[in-house]
Amino acid sequence: MERPVLVTGATGNTGRHVVAGLLAEGVPVRALVRREDHGLPAGVEAVTGDVTDPEAVARAAEGVRAAYLVWPLMTAEGVGPVAAALARHADRVVYLSAAQAGGGDPGERGSWGAVEDAVRDSGAEWVFLRVTGLSANALQWSGRVRTGTVRAPYGDARRSLVHERDVAEVAVRALVDEGHAGRAYLTTGPEAVSQRDQVRMLGEAVGVAARWEEQPREEAAAELTALFGDAGYAEAALEYWASLAERPEEVSGDVERVLGRPALPFSRWARDRADDFR
């Protein structure tokens, strides 16, 4: 019997598409889930546990050929034993990382870089999907798009957001095909789109004349601090968005190189997720 592939974060933005993609290719799938009422497709073998628990990860990884790792924390604390547990069983680990992890300065690499180091040090073959940002991040505006106005800071910040389906398709190829081990793919959309234009595209997708309303930085900082409970994180996020108004996020051709087709544009994502904004 063919060894399964383990998917963590299987009910999340990318994980559910990874599961669907593997099943479509006839690959057995095992999922590490936190709840028994996971709603995954029939045929998926579900193991209950938390990805931050090395013992649960070891149970879920027993006998698998590869693993898709989504690390849910904003810190890398505790990831070493988890990576080691995966490596004891899986030949290859594909980690959903972030573009920042590719920076030369250890401080800039953040927790994503530290997780990459743990996976690399585990001894398993590794593939890193360094995402600039998921288009699904725009779901935070769903309620405001319905009203016709999105009030937020830095409307001119341009992001190369990537469709979660593209991330999942690249992950599936990295999980099942040869030739990807030891690669770090900068996983982006096909262009950098301003936040202002993202709102316009979302409005067009749902039939609403949505517009951007620039929010003062101080007001945005207070909201973000209340949301995340961390003033430092809020300030870092605002600094990053401010920088993107002058220097857009990088656009990479890695998705097209892996999949043999162009990455899906943000306008396509807006149409695909239009019901979430209605």
Image (cartoon, helix red, strand yellow):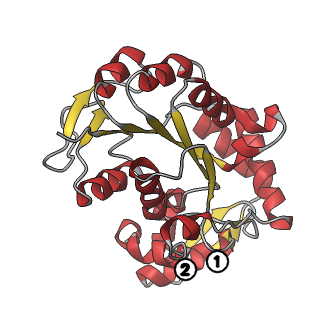
Measuring 66% from the left and 69% from the top, which residue is drawn there?
Answer: 195
Is residue 50 or residue 136 the one in the foreground?
50
Left or right, 246 with respect to 44, comes to right
Q: Is residue 15 visible?
A: yes
Residue type pointed to by label 2? Met
Residue at left offset 56%, top offset 71%: 256
Judge whether residue 75 can be spotted in this image. Answer: no
Q: Quadrant of residue 115?
A: top right
Image-based side of 19 in relation to 251, left or right: left
Looking at the rendered structure, the secondary structure element under dot 2 is helix
Question: Residue 196 lies in what quarter of the image?
Answer: bottom right
185 and 108: which is toward the camera: 185
Q: Amino acid type of disc 1?
A: Asp
C-alpha distance separating marks 1 and 2: 6 Å
In this rendered view, identify the residue nearer to me: 95 or 230: 95
Q: Identify the element where label 1 is drawn.
A: helix
Q: Position of residue 263 (x, y in %)?
A: 54, 72
Q: Which residue is at 71% across, 51% downward?
A: 220
Q: Position of residue 93 (x, y in %)?
A: 47, 37
Q: Position of residue 270 (x, y in %)?
A: 47, 74
Q: Is residue 102 left or right of residue 6?
A: right
In this rendering, is residue 22 above or below 246? above
| Residue 83 placement (x, y as % from top left) | 50, 24
Question: Which residue in the protein does label 1 denote?
Answer: 197
Q: Is residue 6 left or right of residue 186?
A: left
Name the residue beneath numbered marker 2: 201
- Asked whether disc 1 touches disc 2, contact meaning CB atoms under 8 Å apart, the reply is yes
Crowd rating for badge 1 (residues with CA inside 10 Å; few <14, some 14–19, many 20+): some
Q: Nearer the viewer, residue 239 or 38?
A: 38
Q: Quadrant of the N terminus?
A: top left
